[in-house]
Amino acid sequence: TGVAANCNQTQSGATPLTNCSLRDALAAAAAFNGTNGTVPVTVNFSPTTFTAATTITLGSAGSLTIPTYTTIQGRTSGSGASLTNLITVSGAGTYTIFSIAANSVVTINNLAMTNGYSASNAGAIYSGGTLTLNNSSVTNCKSLNGGAGIGSAGTLIVNKSVFTGNTSPILNIQTSQGLTYSAIAAVGPTVISDSTFYNNSATVGAIYSTAS
């Protein structure tokens, strides 16, 4: 499943954990937040382990929950136009990759998400809180009822990210009007900038938002 280093490094200088899975890192972040309240936590990936492109595939434990005040910081190679995200998290075509609870504040930077699936919510990320997604990608995710990429019931901010190959089949309905949304379905404040959407498939298309 890969190794996430410094998985509870915080502004308060907490002792980092090493040699832990991404799931362990997020659990450690949740435990730290439970004790320290609003102190931000950053989950990083080992620079010695993740030297090349690596995929972390979810197993039978299912979706990963990102606790509040947590940032997931992926690794990259190259720079400028050749900048590449090295860490991919896959839902194995079976699970929503990440879930974020209501009132949580979460940031994801430089991470690729692929092959997420949900019959009831979003394929890649379901967020009830405030999610900021920077320099990331959401590809080949599927939902039978909602945004195949991201479903947001809170505040959503997307910067310099790519959504491609996400599908919400027309034969399954999101509303009584039979609408489905392929990349993003948001019912709260939504800001999208410098991002790319292509080859996404649904009745509405790439983005559905009830607020701006």
Image (tube, rainbow, N blue to C red):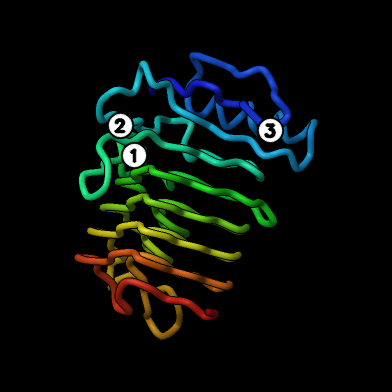
> Three-letter amino acid code at disc 1?
Ser
195 up-or-down from 72: above or below = below
Left/right placement of residue 210 relative to residue 39 reads left
Location of mark 3 (residue):
11
Location of mark 1 (residue):
90
Residue visible at 45% across and 78% down in the picture: 175
SS state under label 2: strand
Classify 10 Å Cα crowding around label 1: few (below 14), some (14-19), many (20 and above).
many
11 up-or-down from 161: above or below = above
Question: Reading the chain from its start, which is encountered first: label 1 or label 3?
Answer: 3
Tag 1 and tag 2, C-beta contact below 8 Å: yes
> Three-letter amino acid code at disc 3?
Gln
Closer to the camera in the image, 95 or 189:
189
Residue visible at 68% across and 33% down in the picture: 11
Q: How far is the residue under mark 1 from the one under mark 3?
A: 29 Å
Residue visible at 25% across and 30% down in the picture: 53
Q: Quadrant of residue 192?
A: bottom left
Location of mark 2 (residue):
55
